[in-house]
Amino acid sequence: MVIVLTGGGTLGPVTPLLAVAEELKKLRPDATFHWIGTFSGPERGLVEAAGMPFSAIRSGKLRRYFSLQNLGDHARLMLGIGDALKVLGRLRPAAVVSAGGFVAVPVAWAAALLGIPVHVHQLDLRPGLANRLTAPFAKSISVGFEELVGRFGRRAVWTGNPVRSSILKGSADEGRRLFGVSKDAPVLLVLGGGTGSAVVNSLVAGSLPRLSKAAQIIHVSGKGKAEGLPEQSARYRRVELLGPEIAHAFAVSDIVVTRAGMGTLSEIAALGKAAIIIPIADSHQEENAAYFRDRGAALCLDENGLTADGFADAVTALLDDASKRTALGAKISALSKPDAALRVADQVVTIALRR
């Protein structure tokens, strides 16, 4: 049974689908996987580290506003359908699985043309344009939040968002070894999303003199975005990207600062970590962040007007309040669905066998 997974441009749709692949392998030991992604996105490294073959195709960015770039991107989208038809025609998969990302659109459309069943998973509270374009061609749909079931009709099933089992197996001792942190001070893990965040990087740089007195910092800056950041020190460790070792970074951390990508938030929830969320302004991430904030499961900061001092104030206040950290961890953990990956995998096997 060949299963094609697709998504990229960011890591948002990637880690949940890797979790689904783990469960698919348990359900169907004969299953093999192939990933279709972008040429320049960060997903290739993570996918190939998981031992999965990878094919890149052309695809335009899907914009909701007028731009002359749309003309060229529409052409690339058509070319991407041709690329996807070639890959799918060669592989003849039993099913195609997507969790969003613009590269998934030509793959899902090509699959529909070839009669290959498609499964779509909706991670975020606000359905993205890619999923809205691919959902009409899906044989089955899963959603991360119960509130979304009505948005996709009778095919939609509330599963929760998948989390890789490896995330749950991190070791604090290994985290201390890998990142050179000690037991003598709390650890702050700062994530800027799959492609990094200039806003978050700037906040870390500006607040580091204060933060490094209160905690040890592990800062994931994003590939190619370390320029201008402070030099590493005993209290400040910086890496561009994290692969499997992110499980150990989570395990050793006392607080996680993150953007509001649902893949990462789902992993934080599964681990019951105290989190400070800085969503991308005027984006779907604000709705993701508000969901956790309104349930008392995370602290949220508005990047508009947020200064380095304001950021440091929020972090140090949480570092000083162990009971608050415990309460946040318990409440975010209660929002996790531990069997989400298995439930999605079961749907994929069902449509694959019906073909």
Image (tube, rainbow, N blue to C red):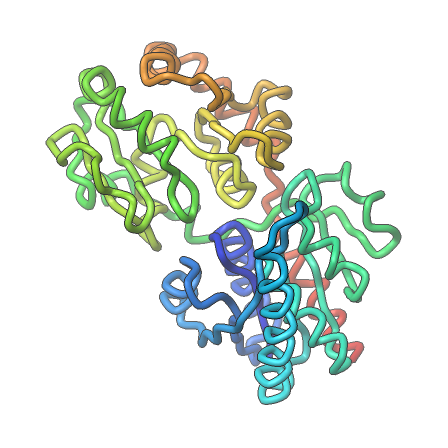
Q: Residue at x 24, y 19 (%)?
A: 211
Pinpoint residue 151: horizontal percent, then vertical percent. 82, 45
Choose between 4 and 247: the one closer to the eye. 4
Pinpoint residue 337: horizontal percent, then vertical percent. 62, 42
Placement of 294 over or under 94, stated as above or below: above
Residue reaching furthest to the front:
68
Q: Residue at x 22, y 41 (%)?
A: 227
Pinpoint residue 13: horizontal percent, then vertical percent. 55, 54
Pinpoint residue 187: horizontal percent, then vertical percent. 27, 28
Which image quarter is the C terminus in?
Answer: bottom right
Q: Residue at x 70, y 76 (%)?
A: 111
Placement of 177 over or under 105, stated as above or below: above
Q: Residue at x 60, y 85 (%)?
A: 86
Residue reaching furthest to the right:
154
Placement of 45 over or under 204, stated as above or below: below
Left or right: 156 in relation to 220: right
Choose between 192 and 30: the one closer to the eye. 192
